[in-house]
């Protein structure tokens, strides 16, 4: 933009131009300050967590009514501290610049691994997981981030089926933006998502789940976008939902 310079008589100072559009937006500054604050809160929180655990151990089995009350209050404190810790860690994961280690990933094997590590806990919730492995192109990606993304969607599927149900997981060949792609499809038979809620579920802190922070989906989307992919959602209320992670195949991004 042209800046008209008015030269004052006798003035020798050079005019310094400053274009305000060079500034980052303040939302970014606030987000990074919030990230720092949350990071600083982590250490005292973990001290509180350990101290409350030690106090509970010291108290042992409560006998008097007074001890019972103290025990109950300490347990409430501890579970709330742990809840704050979970919120803080998820927040950090969402705001921290994400480091990617790219490996050649066998997506079908990765999904199988996520399921086998969590099968017991999932089945305890009354959810039956059905997975059909398939040979698909490899993906250039970060195994542990992709593991986390798939697990988040599996956990959401389970939360949507509080009475239990079936979770169908498929891996298939596809195309995305004119190139070869791999799709991980996670379909539940749960409550489904209302049409008006659907556009909001990837926003931070949108949650209808008890004890949920609403950071699972934004974190998952962030991970998949880092891989050049996207997430598609189809849902019918009362019938269930299907979340499809689309990842460009290795060499086609
Ligand atoms: N498979 C699903 N079926 C129905 N609703 C879903 C499903 N997945 C996500 N949602 C809706 O989207 C919301 C946001 O999901 P998200 O994973 O971000 O948060 P959360 O699961 O509530 O908490 P957390 O941070 O522990 O993951 C959920 O609370 C729920 O309302
Ligand atoms: Mg979640």
Image (spheres, helix red, strand yellow):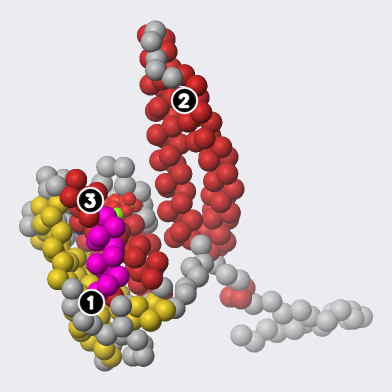
* Figure quarter occupied by ligand 1: bottom left
The residue nearer to you, when weighing 4 against 80, is 80
The residue nearer to you, when weighing 184 against 215, is 184
Query: Is label 3's Cβ within 8 Å of ligand 2?
Result: no
Q: Which residues are magenta?
A: 108-118
Q: Residue at x 68, y 84 (%)?
A: 3
Q: Which residue is mark 3?
A: 120
Q: Residues within 10 Å of mark 1 (few under 14, many from 20)?
A: many
Q: Are the residues tagged 3 and 1 within 8 Å (C-beta)?
A: no
Q: Residues within 10 Å of mark 2 (few under 14, many from 20)?
A: few
Point out residue 205 in the picture as x, y percentages from the top left corner.
Answer: 36, 52
Point out residue 218 in the picture as x, y percentages from the top left corner.
Answer: 36, 62
Q: Which residue is mark 2?
A: 57
Indicate left or right for 212 with 82 as reference: left
**Rendered position, 156 above or below 4:** above
Front disc: 2 or 1:
2
The residue nearer to you, when weighing 70 against 61, is 61
The first of marks 2 and 3 along the sequence is 2
Disc 1 is placed on an element classified as: strand
The residue nearer to you, when weighing 93 against 65, is 65
Indicate left or right for 62 with 189 as reference: right
Quarter of the image with the C terminus in it: bottom left
Disc 2 is placed on an element classified as: helix
**Membership of 116 in magenta stretch:** yes
Q: Which residue is mark 1?
A: 183
Q: Is residue 106 visible?
A: yes
Q: Are the residues tagged 2 and 3 within 8 Å (C-beta)?
A: no
Point out residue 108 in the picture as x, y percentages from the top left corner.
Answer: 25, 74
What's the distance in space between the residues labelled 2 and 3, CA to CA? 29 Å
Front disc: 3 or 1:
3
């Amino acid at each position: 933009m042209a800046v008209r310079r008015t030269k004052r008589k006798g003035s020798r100072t050079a005019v310094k131009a400053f274009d305000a559009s060079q500034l980052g937006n303040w939302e970014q500054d606030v987000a990074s300050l919030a990230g720092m604050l949350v990071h600083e809160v982590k250490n005292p929180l973990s001290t509180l967590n350990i101290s409350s655990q030690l106090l509970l151990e010291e108290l042992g089995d409560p006998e008097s009514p007074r001890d019972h009350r103290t025990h109950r209050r300490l347990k409430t404190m501890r579970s709330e501290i742990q809840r704050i810790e979970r919120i803080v860690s998820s927040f950090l994961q969402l705001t921290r610049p994400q480091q990617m280690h790219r490996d050649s990933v066998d997506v079908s094997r990765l999904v199988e691994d996520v399921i086998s590590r969590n099968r017991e806990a999932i089945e305890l919730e009354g959810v039956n997981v059905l997975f059909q492995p398939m040979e698909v192109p490899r993906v250039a990606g970060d195994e542990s981030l992709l593991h986390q993304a798939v697990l988040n969607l599996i956990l959401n599927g389970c939360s949507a089926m509080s009475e239990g149900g079936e979770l169908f997981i498929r891996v298939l060949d596809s195309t995305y933006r004119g190139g070869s792609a791999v799709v991980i499809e996670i379909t539940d038979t749960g409550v489904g998502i209302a049409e008006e809620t659907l556009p909001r579920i990837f926003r931070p802190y949108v949650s209808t789940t008890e004890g949920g922070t609403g950071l699972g989906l934004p974190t998952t989307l962030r991970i998949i976008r880092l891989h050049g992919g996207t997430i598609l959602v189809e849902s019918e209320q009362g019938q269930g939902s299907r979340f499809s992670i689309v990842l460009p195949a290795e060499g086609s991004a």
